[in-house]
Structures are given as C-alpha cells and as structure tokens.
Amino acid sequence: MRIEGVPASAGYAEGPLFDLDRPPAVYAGKATAAEEKTSLEAAIGKAVSRLATIVETADSDAAGILEFHIAMLEDDALSGPAFASIASGRTADAAWRQALDAEIAGYEASDQDYFRARATDLRDIRDQVLRALTEDDDPAAPSGAILCGEDIAPTRFLETDWSHGGGIALKAGSTASHVAMLARSRGVPMIVGLREPPAKLAGMALLDAEHGSIVLAPSPAEIGSFRQSAASFAARQGKARTFLARPAVTRAGTAVRVQVNIADPSDVDAIDIATCDGVGLMRTEFLFGKTLPDEETQYRAYRKVLEWAAEKPVTIRTVDAGGDKPVPGFTVEEGNPFLGLRGIRLSLARLDIFRVQIRALLRAAPHGNLRVMFPMIAMAEEYERAASLFAEEQAELAARGAAQQMPPLGIMVEVPSVAIAPEAFAGVAFFSIGSNDLTQYVMAAARDNAAVAHLNSVRHPAVLRLIGSVTAFGRENGIPVSLCGDAGGDPASIPALIEAGLRDLSVAPAQLAMAKAAISDVSI
Amino acid sequence: MSAAAEATVLITHDVGLHARPSVKFTKLAKTFAADVEIALAANGPWFDAKSIVKVMAAKAPKGTVLHIRARGDDANDAIRALIELVRRDFDENAGHVRSA
C-alpha cells in the first residue's frame, strides 16, 4: 500500500515502522496530595536532567530549542496551576496535563505562525513530564526505524540515533517545524501530511522523501525499484555535494546562474546564500492562509528575505491564488479554475487586496535587490495596468514620506499567448518562464491529474520550441530570461533547457546541488 | 533604599522576543534582585520578566516597542542591561550577512 505525502527533507529510508502514538503507560495515583506533589516535582526534575544530558552533545540549533524547553520546565509559572490543582485533589498526571493543555491552547490560538508552531514544543514539554511520571522510560525506536505518527516531538527526534538510517512520516506536521529544519540539516528523510492514515503501523516500510511517499508491506518488486532509486539518489547527492559551493558551469565552460525558489521566508534559514545566485521565485501564497495578510506582515516577510540575500537579486511573485491554490475570502469557486480567475486576473479584480501587497513590496524594496513579477499574464494590458498601480502606490507612499523604491517589474511566461507572441511585452524588465503551467497549457493536461501525467512533459518539442523562442526574443531585445518551474531542478530536463538557450534557472533549495551537478555534465 | 526605573526599547531581532531570545532575556533578568516587568504598551498588561512562560505570553513580534520597568535596589542596572541585550539583537546576529 502506497501513501502519498509532502517531502519535508529529501532522502530514502527502508526499515521497520515505529508507532509514535502508542498509548502511554497508565499513571498509578498516590494516596495523598503531598505524595502527588512530590511525584510531579520528581518527574519535572527528571525531564530537566534528561534534557540537560542531551544539550551537552547537541549542535547550536538543537541546543537553543532544548534550552527553551528547560527554561519553561524550570519556570514556576508553568507548573503553578498544576500544583494548585493537585492541592485541590487531582492526581499529578491529570493536573499536569490540564495545566499544559491550557497553555498549549493559548499558543494554538495565536494569530502569529511562529507562536502557533511553538504549540508543538509545549506538547513535547507536557509529554516529557508525563513520560517521567509513568516511569515509562520509552522503549527507543529500533535502529533504522521509520517513525510514523500524528506529529513528532523535537526531543524524540534528538534522542533518536539516526546513524543507521531511518526516517519520519507524519500525518500532520509541517515543513516549517523545528523537526523539519533539524531533519533537513541532518539529512534525515522526512515526509509530512500523509494523504491517509496508515492502516497498521508494523512491519517493513519504504520511505521515499525525495518525491513524497511511503510504501507499507512492500512487494519484492517495489523493494527492488526503491533500492535503485535510493542508490541513484545517494550517488547523485554524493557527487552533487562537491558542486554546491561552486558557481555552475557546463563542461564547455558556459556559466549558468542557479537561483532558488522559496515558498516561506523561513526557508532561507536553511540555505547558505553563497551557494546560489539569488532567489528566482519567492511565492507569496503562503502569506494568504486562513486570513488575508496585512501590509506590515507582508513587508516584514519580504524584507527578511531581501536582507538575507544581501546584494543578490530576489524575485518576488505577486500572489498567484486561484487554480489549485484557493484562498478563502479571495478566490472564487469555478468549474475550470486553471483557466479562470487566478494570478494577475484575480489581483486586478480585487484591487483592495492587490494594493496592500504592492505597498508592502515598494516599502521592502530599499532593503535589498528586489524584482517583482506578475503571474498568469496573457495580454500586455494586464502588465500595464499592474505597472500603473505600482506607480500610483509609489506616489502615495512618497507623498506620505515613507521609504520606498520602484523595483524592476517583470512577468511570468506561462500562458501560451505570451510565449507565442512575446513582442507585445518588449517593455517588461524581465521574463521568468513558469514551466509547470506553460507545459500544462500547451499540452492541455492538468498538472494535478495523474491520468494525463504522461502528457505533462516540459521536454515535448512544442514546449521546448516555445522556451527557445522566448529566450531568443529576450536575448535580441536585452530582456533577461530565466526559468523557475520544477523542470529547472530536474537533472533529466536541464540539458534540454540549456540547449534551448536558458542560462538562468531557479530550483528548489534541496535540488540546488543536483542541478549544479547536472549542469556540469552538459556539453554546450 | 528602593529605586524604580522604566524605559522602552525597539525589538529589531528578526522573529521578535521569541523562544531563544526569551531564554536569554529571562536569564539576565534573574541576575538582578529588582522586580522586573515588561509590557507591549505603556499602560500594560505587565508580565514578570523573570518568567519565560510570562515573557512568551507577551508574544512580542519584531518591531514591537518593549516597555521595561523595575523596582528594587538595582533597578537602574537591570533596565540598562536588559535594554542593551535587546539592542544587541540578543547576540544572535553575529554570523549574519546584512545589506547596508
């Protein structure tokens, strides 16, 4: 049985499943409140000393997290309500759980992502003490196991010996969690957001955290092909690592710029700016979650990435909602969303929302080397309208005396009309080819429909010819052209893209090294 | 002799007064005898600066003007030291490359 998920840390693991959510042992209640109190004090002390032991060998990122846990555990303000509730007759475990659950609920209710994410730390703190209370010195996961469950506690990750392989597959979880960060920096394969819960957490499993899936009870054929993929990944990675720190150059000496695509400002925390030529695509949909982001929230997010990149360019795409990315209160329900009101079409239909983003971008621009591009442009009028909105908002900000700067404005080339007749866009500052959408529109094959996946190839001659002609048009007219779709990081597609004339690719951070390695094999 | 002092400082650290900065902040506050409190507005609510649970509960993002007040013999020293820590971005940005 194969279950799809979202890759959080690339890699492959084959091993026994370990259930993270086994029910904990039952706490044996004591006779008096005084004994309950002693028992909780001892459990907190035990949890602290276990953490202190792990801190000694942890790297600085991990130590920062653990020291936070220790400080919380040592704070009377955290345990106070639990001791009060013990005094009024509760058992130590119920009192602690109640006190911590109240604290956790406070974090979960926060409107800031950072604080909501800390609920995971609080649950970890709660469970460490509950574990100590039940004397259930957790059986460690067997070496090389695939840890599977709802979510994973940072301490569980740090206590686990990863030296013999293993991985993580979570039903919930987030690619922005502390554990996901740690997993990426240690190279532990991890996927999150499993599409369906595994039926039975026992036996062997195959974790493919490069593409995002886990196979339970695999057949010999599945094991065989998995091992091939894993070996090829390891070989590519080993080779790629030697390329990461160097500028990308083909075998013939042609320089190729390689930038990164990011989805969340925190993505840059795990990337060394020296290993890439900038940010070729910063998506802004992540900001448009449950609620529409205000100007300040957007400004801070953009500024963080600009400052991280220093002088290197950061290309931010205005919100590309709609299609397969609905946003409550913003996008509309449509029968055929990929061909409907999405990208710039939606932004121009909702100027109240678009103007907020434009102001945030203009204000962030002085903090780095910003470029802004519009998604789903089909006609020159759309670009001109968007550019005039930038000019209007700039004048407003200037009149208010706010610091601002007009960034170069470019467009995504993803609607075939632009790729076929680029001459209407001779005035834009740059082109960025969105190969995923361009391919789906040229091939008339929805990219989220597995039944037509075989049609969805960037290497079809029709798609490559369009990429080639846009690149040639850009070269002749002095308009820089780059590509920011998945194809840019796909070693199998890179030779064709370079042959089509591209010299600027933007790839997922995890693909950076492999993309550079693939470029070095190209003979042009 | 008991002194009282109060001051404000702008939080410029990238994520604000969050997990790691809060650990440093409360550890430093505890080195003083004075009672120290923080708030996000001049009229409160005030949070005990020696309790990480309370400091985290203040949920101060980047760009917040942090109000600090102290009462006790070393109140002035406490305020001075805590303001300095916030101004130094909690000593966390040493390795970062920043644009001008």
Image (cartoon, coloured by chain):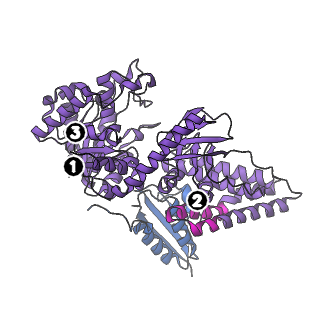
Chain colours: A purple, B blue
Q: Chain of mark 3?
A: A
Q: Chain of mark 2?
A: B
Q: Secondary structure at mark 1?
A: loop
Task: Report the side of A68 relative to A199 (left or right).
Answer: left
Report x, y in % for residue A484. Answer: 30, 40
Mark 1 on the same chain as mark 3: yes
Question: Does A225 lie within the magenta span?
Answer: no
Relative to A276, residue A454 above or below: above
Residue at point 20% right, 48% down? A398
Which dot, 1 or 3, sits closer to the camera?
3
Q: Secondary structure at mark 3?
A: helix
Q: Chain of mark 1?
A: A
Report x, y in % for residue A430. Answer: 19, 40
What type is the residue that disc 2 sits on? Lys
Main SS, magenta residues: helix
The label on residue A499 is: 3
Residue A354 versus residue A395: which sits nearer the camera?
A354
The reply to whether the C-beta atoms of the residues labelled 2 and 3 are less than 8 Å apart is no
The reply to whether the C-beta atoms of the residues labelled 2 and 1 are less than 8 Å apart is no
What type is the residue that disc 3 sits on? Glu
Which dot, 2 or 1, sits closer to the camera?
1
> Which residue is tagged 1?
A405
Which residues make up the magenta segment?
A51-77
Sort mark 1 into few (<14), some (14-19) or many (20+) by Cα contacts within 10 Å. some
Relative to A357, residue A271 above or below: below
Residue at point 85% right, 54% down? A29
> Which residue is tagged 2?
B54
Task: Report the side of B15 relative to A52 (left or right).
Answer: left
Spatial CA span between label 1 and label 3: 36 Å
Relative to B36, residue B14 above or below: above
